[in-house]
Structures are given as C-alpha cells and as structure tokens.
Image: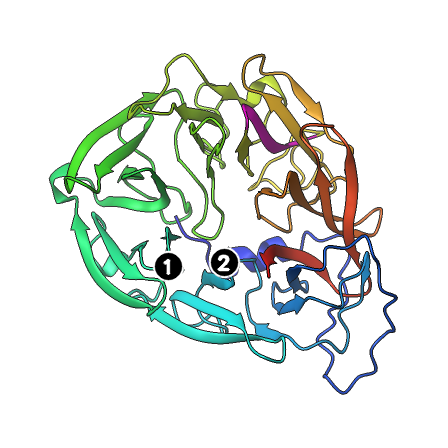
C-alpha cells in the first residue's frame, strides 16, 4: 500500500501547531555550543528534522553535539521528504531522491567538511511511492519494484547502487488483481529472506489491500539453495506492515526471533481482525501459533505502529485513548496528537510497562534502535514542546534524555555512526 501526496497533506493538517524549520543558510551566525564531556566523542549523530509539510534537512554532528541542539547555521542536505533513513556503517539510505519526485533508493554519506551529501541513486521503474528496500550488507541489497513485477524481488549492490538481478516468486500467484512479494516486509535472518506475500483487491478510496482470506502470509526464501522454502500463514488479522518507509518488522539480536506487526484494517478497525504482533522463532520458518500480542489487550481501537525487539522485550507505542487513522476525531482524539506512549512489553507475560518518556504524536515513524547498551527512542510532543531523542538502558531500567532540538523543527529521524 502506498502513501499518496493528498493523504499526506491531509494528515499534515492534524498538527496542533507548526514547528519552525531551521534551514538557515550557512552564513547565519551559529549559537555557541559549550562542549559537554558526557557526550561520546567517537560518534557522529545524523539528525533528520522536518517542517509541517514533511520537508527538512539531514545534518551530521560530530564535535558540535550538545544536549540542546539548534541546527541554525549548520550545513545540511535539503530533502523534500525528511522521514528518516537507515544506515550501514557511515552510509545512509532513504526512500526516493532529495526532491521526492524520483522513486527509488537514495544513498548518502558525509564529506570531508562534515556535510551530508548525495552519493548515488538507484531508480525504480515505477512512478508511484512504493519502493520498499533492505540493505543487508555493503554488497547485498533487495528492493521491490511493481513495474518489474509484483511477484519479483529485485537485487542490488548498496555500494555501487546498481541492480544485480531478481528473484522470481511468480509460482506463488493466486490470480488476484493485486499481488506482491516484499512490498512491505523484506527481512533477512541468517541465509533466509522473510517477505510479506500480499494478494487481493483494492478499492479506489482505500490504500489497503483486501485479501480474499483474512490472514497474513510470509514467504521464506533460502539464499543458499535459491529456492522458496516455505509460505507460512496465520489468521485473525490482516495487512502486515504499513508504508514503504515505515518498517514494521524487527529481529531480536539476542534471541534471533523475528517479529512482525500487522495493522489489521485501519479504516474499519474490526475487533475480530485487529492489529497484532506475531513471531517466527529462531531456527523456524513458520509463525509461532502459541504467541501473539493483540492491540485489544492494551487499547482499542488502535494499531501497533512502531516495533523493536530486544532480549525478549517488545518496544512499541500504545495510545492513551482510542484512535483512528482515518476517522480524524471520531474516537475523541486525533491520531497525530500527544497520545502515543513508549512501552516495554514482556514477551513471556505480555505485560506492558510505560517508559518514562514524553508522549509522542506520531510525526516520526522511526523505530527504536540499540546502540552500546542503550535503546534510543524518538518523540515529538506538542503540549510539552519536546522534540528529541531519549535513551533507555534495558538492564538498569534507567531513562535519560539524549538531546532535544531547539527552534529546529521536529525530529523525524536519527542515526548514530561510530567513528
């Protein structure tokens, strides 16, 4: 499913206030930054900030890191869609080019002056906002391009940004009008790919695909034998994932279990096919039928819209009130209000514990990530005027503020590069 410009524009109107965006010229005077000895000197912080129309800049901060960051006067790469990106080492990757008019995968890096710069672009043959991708290593990448074939997964080299081939899944066709493999989920664990298999129909006023059977499916592909190993299915929910730049799968690097979030039908929000978090255990290629987290256990109507797994804990946001992505204020609160609270859910007990962090308003879709013993979370909060990053130590349960933006728009993405 894709996020079209008109729908994104409509969502923008839900913002309670419009943040100022600090795309000042490099000639503007910089605010003096006092060195903070508690900040890691061997890290470069990559910050994506944005304005109300989702445009923004990508900044790299190394020696000028601070607990309170004003981006005015700092060099940046201007982008029309600043929804965050993914990094592999010191390389950055995001959906579409800097103008957001060319569909594909954009590669960026940091030049000798410390500025984020373009380093290559792999175009999609499609002109629609729908290119999902995975960077598995410096030489191994995968992406989905509908024009090349909905049931084909494309391969590319993330260093040269060249297409290197494709994997054909046409044998999985069910004869439905819309069929895709890896459109929303491209995950890799060991030598296997885990890809969402989506088959069904779509009405003109709905961006979600309606499957003929209310279930979700993951196709497992063995990269060693170059064969489809399995297709695992589970009912009781629909629609794995949301958007191409909104990743809803996570590999627990401690247990090696794979987790996936479904959103159900975000338009009708049925109770019998609600949003869930599912698992494929380490060493397995089928859904674990003895495990699921159901959003109804925590809040409803609502959906799981962020996902990170670490050491048998699930990290996600749970709203404080019922919400509807389509319905505006029909459930008493707008979807992009300060109602999303970061929680830690124990996989064994399914108990959710709210973390000591500012509520978020879902203007950033980036998932948490683990770095040097800490898990990092992004939050934008209108009522408290907070836009920044929090960090949480899962061993000690201690939470602290990493940094906050000052008069610099909202945080929409954050990466850490170890120098």
What is the crowding at mark 1: few (fewer than 14 residues within 10 Å), some, or many (at least 20)?
few
Q: Is residue 173 visible?
A: no
- In the rendered image, residue 374 lying in the magenta stretch gets the answer no
Local secondary structure at mark 2:
loop
Boundaries of the magenta span: 311-319
Seen from the viewer's position, the closer of residues 393 and 242 is: 393
Q: Which residue is mark 2?
A: 89
Label 2 vs 1, first from the N-terminus = 2
The part of the image, by quadrant, that contains residue 307 is: top right
Q: Is residue 280 left or right of residue 68?
A: left
Q: Nearer the viewer, residue 315 or 394?
A: 394
Q: Is residue 215 above or below residue 289?
A: below
The location of residue 236, given as percent across then percent down, is: 39, 20
Name which residue lies at 72% across and 60% down. Answer: 41
Give above or below for 326 relative to 323. below
Image coordinates for residue 261, horizontal then vertical, percent: 46, 32
Q: 75 above or below 87?
A: below
Q: Which mark is residue 6?
A: none
Q: Are marks 2 and 1 in contact (CB under 8 Å)?
A: yes
Q: Position of residue 137 (x, y in %)?
A: 37, 54
**How many numbered marks does the figure carry?**
2
The residue at 26%/45% (across/down) is 180
Q: Which mark is residue 138?
A: 1
Determine the main secondary structure of the stretch shown in magenta.
strand
Whether residue 161 is visible: yes
Position of residue 162 measured from the top left corner of the image (x, y, whole percent): 28, 68
Q: Is residue 314 magenta?
A: yes
């Amino acid at each position: 499913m894709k996020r079209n410009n008109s729908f994104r524009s409509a969502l923008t109107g839900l913002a309670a206030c419009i943040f100022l965006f600090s795309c000042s010229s490099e000639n503007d005077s910089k605010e003096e930054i006092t060195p903070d000895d508690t900040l890691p000197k061997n890290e470069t912080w990559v910050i994506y900030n944005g304005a109300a129309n989702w445009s923004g800049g990508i900044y790299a901060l190394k020696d000028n890191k601070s607990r309170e960051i004003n981006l005015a006067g700092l060099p940046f790469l201007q982008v029309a869609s600043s929804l965050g990106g993914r990094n592999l080492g010191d390389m950055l990757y995001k959906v579409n080019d800097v103008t957001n008019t060319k569909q594909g995968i954009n590669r960026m890096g940091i030049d000798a002056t410390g500025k984020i710069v373009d380093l290559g672009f792999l175009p999609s043959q499609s002109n629609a906002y729908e290119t999902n991708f995975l960077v598995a290593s410096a030489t191994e990448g995968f992406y989905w391009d509908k024009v090349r074939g909905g049931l084909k997964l494309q391969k590319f080299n993330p260093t040269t940004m060249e297409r290197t081939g494709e994997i054909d899944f046409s044998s999985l066709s069910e004869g439905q009008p819309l069929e895709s493999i890896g459109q929303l989920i491209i995950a890799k664990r060991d030598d296997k790919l885990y890809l969402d298999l989506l088959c069904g129909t779509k009405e003109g006023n709905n961006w979600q695909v309606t499957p003929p059977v209310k279930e979700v499916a993951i196709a497992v592909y063995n990269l060693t034998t170059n064969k489809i190993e399995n297709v695992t299915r589970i009912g009781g929910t629909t629609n794995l994932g949301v958007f191409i730049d909104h990743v809803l799968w996570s590999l627990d690097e401690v247990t090696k279990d794979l987790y996936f979030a479904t959103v159900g039908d975000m338009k009708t929000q049925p109770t019998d096919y609600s949003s869930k978090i599912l698992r494929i255990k380490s060493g397995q290629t089928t859904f674990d039928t003895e495990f699921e987290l159901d959003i109804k256990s925590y809040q409803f109507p609502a959906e799981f819209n962020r996902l990170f797994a670490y050491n048998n804990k699930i990290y996600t946001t749970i709203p404080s009130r019922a919400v509807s992505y389509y319905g505006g204020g029909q459930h008493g609160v707008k979807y992009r209000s300060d109602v999303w609270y970061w929680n830690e859910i124990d996989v064994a007990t399914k108990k959710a514990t709210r973390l000591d962090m500012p509520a978020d308003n879902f203007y950033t879709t980036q998932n948490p990530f683990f770095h040097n013993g800490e898990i990092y979370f992004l939050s934008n909060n209108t009522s408290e005027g907070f836009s920044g990053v929090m960090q949480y130590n899962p061993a000690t349960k201690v939470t602290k503020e990493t940094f906050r933006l000052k008069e610099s728009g909202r945080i929409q993405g954050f990466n850490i590069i170890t120098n």
